[in-house]
Image (tube, coloured by chain):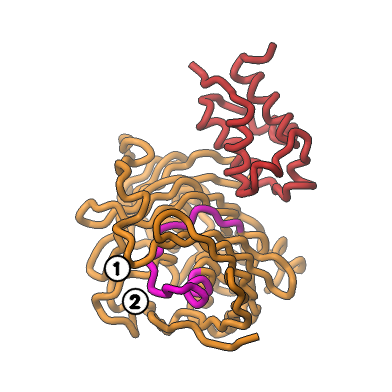
Chain colours: A red, B orange
Amino acid sequence: MNAVVDKEELRRTIAGTLDVDVTEVTDDAHFTDELDVDSLMALEVMVVLERTYGVKLDESRLPEMTSFQRAYDLLLEHTGQRA
Amino acid sequence: MTTATSPGRTARASRVPVRVVDHRPDGGLVSATFPVDLPVLAGHYPGFPIVPGVLLVEVAEQAARALAAQPAMRWTGIPATRFRSPVLPGDAVLVDVRLEESGVGGTTARCVLTVGGRPVADVRLVFVGPLAPDSPAAGRPAADPSPDPVAYPCPHRDLRSVLPHRHPILLVDRVTRVVPGLWIETVKAISVSEPCMADEPTTAAYPWPLTVESWCQSAGLLAAWTAPNPDVLTGDVMLFGGISGIELHRAPHPGEFLVHQAELVREAAGTQIVAGTTRASDGALVMRVERITMVRRPASVLTGTGDA
């Protein structure tokens, strides 16, 4: 049973993983360009999402995870909560 | 602009001296230079000296203590650290420290380390002052990240054939159990004859950065068990990418064994994410590691030339 994805909870989780203020993680802030996320941190974010929400994400989807909104969409897809 | 030296409470021969160059109400600036003849560099790595990431953490710790109202405050954790760029022998590191109160009697130190304006690491540390009863983490149950798996019989293997680290910074003595690609258990004996303990009372605690390094080398052994990397000149340099959520519990001392357990959480494109614990010989929890990111990179990528 997957956890329900609360968007603001997810925002706090990602902000905590990136060690930035939650207000910096806007929907469209680009992880690499605006939040200084490198490939190692992107993998960390993926691992944290997997552990928090009990899903298995494929590394091949990593390049798609470019912003908070994209990460949220990816997670909804994997937890079967996409409308 | 003021000039002062660090409190020197635990002046250790292997420790890099730090110097306060600016004091602000919320912190300040501290400088430290890693000398080219720093003993640890001979083993990290032979033919390709590079400053171990844990020494950057140690310099940040010293910088925080040098600026704090209570220099003897107890170090209780490393919530987050990012290693951005390698530090080489001779590099002068400038540490910008911001101290904040956290919890009852606690202090958080946010440290930004640069070399000539180039960011090399962001280090966040937490301390609890000497009056605080215990670390906020101490009351939590000390569960290991996973139950012991059924481990394969472990051949007594020369660890120098697996890892590139050498004396005095090879900090694992033996692998006791391993499930290649998944999990490892290692042992390190702490002795007063180690270089870092040379100028310390024999009752002194083993330095936390070296306990972290020893755990990370265990993680490195897990990662390299089936793909040995004994020589960085023909293989890869092993580097930290980041540290998240290290809790420091009971400090280990000479005469004790560290028993490290590390579990591979994820591996992708030469990057490994590893979690685990360290316990002392009596079973007491020494350290918990939520997550460490490790990478293997060819030496040529780091220098841009292929030689050191």
Q: Position of residue B5 (x, y in %)?
A: 51, 86
Lateral position of residue B249 relative to residue B36, left or right = left
Instruction: Find the magenta span and give its range.
Output: B61-82
Residue at 37%, 61% (x, y): give it: B172
Q: Is residue B167 visible?
A: no
Residue at 62%, 66% (x, y): give it: B233
* Residue with the mark numbered 1: B190
Q: How many marks?
A: 2
Lateral position of residue B260 relative to residue B79, left or right = left
Say whether mark 2 and mark 1 are on the same chain.
yes
Lateral position of residue B6 relative to residue A14, left or right = left
Residue at 33%, 58% (x, y): give it: B174
* Residues under numbered marks 1 and 2 in contact, where contact means CB atoms less than 8 Å apart: yes
Q: Locate residue A23: give its quadrant.
A: top right
Q: Is residue A75 magenta?
A: no
The label number, if any, that marks residue B83 in the structure image: none
* Residue with the mark numbered 2: B194
